[in-house]
Image (cartoon, rainbow, N blue to C red):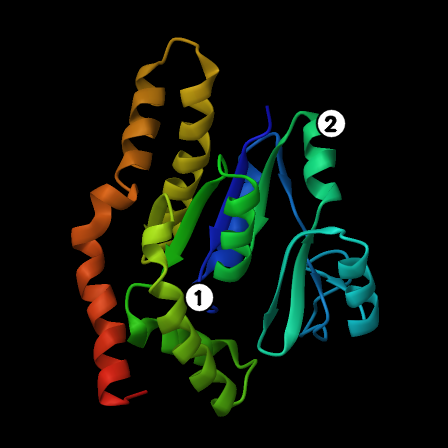
């Protein structure tokens, strides 16, 4: 049975890097490449990071009910095609969906058994620094992304796991543990000492087990919003 993993994060949280690394390590894992109406950035290529389509093409796919989920983000459409789930099921693979908060809610409504993971930045200041280092966006866009990040983070309680992306290598290990732990739970095979360690590492990222660590992170966004700071 195919397990669907949803991964969401504010822009600049390092989600793409984590996903790329984990895809190279975890076997039998299909990745959904989303469709979007935005223009390619930098070295992005069609069919690699996204399928880049016109607004008209996207709307025609909506009309034909070809999406598992779709949303308007910063004036551009993003969507996950239904056929990626069917292909994963036919291939006996699990499926990883890299989607925003809006899309995650749609997927959970259609696939309640899907596992959801929210990637959290260490704090607002770090997120702003990462956005500036990318040098992809104008100042106005950076500020808009920070405001959107605050709103997205408010949805953290809707997710099964929260991963604070502070140190890259540790975050890669934690994300890998979450994916593998869910497989172990449904495997029915005897567990080794390594399996037990994987399960324990994943459990530390469970929403119920990480709330205390999240409080200063949430406060950093709340304080900036209240004060009107950058």
Q: Check disc 2 and report its element: helix, strand or loop.
A: helix
* Position of residue 14 measured from the top left corner of the image (x, y, whole percent): 45, 61
Residues marked 2 and 1 touching at CB (< 8 Å) = no
**Quarter of the figure with the N terminus:** top right
In this rendering, the answer to whether 128 lies above or below 200 is: below
The residue beneath circle 1 is 10
What is the x, y in percent for residue 40?
71, 72
* Quadrant that contains the C terminus: bottom left
Judge the density around disc 2: few (<14), some (14-19), many (≥20) Cα neighbours within 10 Å.
Answer: few
Instruction: Work out whether residue 107 or residue 91 is closer to the camera in this orientation and state it.
Output: 107
Q: Residues within 10 Å of mark 1 (few under 14, many from 20)?
A: many
**Residue 228 shows in this picture:** yes
Disc 2 to disc 1, how far (Cα)?
A: 32 Å
Q: Which residue is mark 2?
A: 90
The residue at 35%/72% (across/down) is 150
Give me the residue at 21% from left, 51% from top: 211
Q: Total of numbered circles in the picture?
A: 2
Rendering quarter of residue 87 = top right
Q: Position of residue 38 (x, y in %)?
A: 70, 74
Residue occupying image coordinates x 34% and y 21%: 194
Q: Secondary structure at mark 1?
A: loop
Left or right position of 184 against 56: left
Decide which of 110, 15 is in the foreground and name it: 110
51 left or right of 222? Answer: right
For residue 195, which quarter of the picture? Answer: top left
């Amino acid at each position: 049975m195919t397990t669907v993993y949803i991964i969401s994060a504010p822009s600049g949280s390092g989600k793409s890097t984590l996903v790329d690394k984990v895809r190279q390590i975890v076997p039998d894992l299909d990745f959904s490449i989303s469709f979007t109406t935005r223009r390619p950035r930098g070295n992005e290529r069609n069919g690699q990071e996204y399928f880049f389509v016109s607004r008209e093409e996207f709307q025609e796919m909506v009309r034909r009910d070809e999406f598992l989920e779709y949303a308007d983000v910063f004036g551009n459409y993003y969507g996950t095609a239904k056929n990626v789930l069917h292909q994963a099921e036919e291939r006996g693979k699990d499926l990883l969906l890299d989607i925003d908060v809006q899309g995650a809610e749609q997927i959970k409504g259609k696939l309640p058994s899907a596992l959801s993971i929210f990637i959290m930045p260490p704090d607002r200041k770090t997120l702003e620094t990462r956005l500036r280092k990318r040098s992809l966006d104008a100042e106005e866009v950076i500020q808009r992304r920070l405001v959107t990040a605050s709103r997205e983070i408010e949805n953290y309680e809707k997710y099964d796991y929260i991963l604070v992306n502070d140190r890259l290598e540790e975050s890669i290990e934690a994300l890998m543990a979450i994916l593998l732990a869910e497989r172990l739970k449904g495997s029915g095979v005897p567990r080794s000492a390594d399996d037990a360690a994987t399960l324990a590492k994943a459990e530390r990222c469970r929403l119920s087990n990480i709330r205390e660590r999240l409080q200063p992170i949430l406060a950093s966004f709340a304080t900036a919003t209240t004060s009107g700071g950058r």
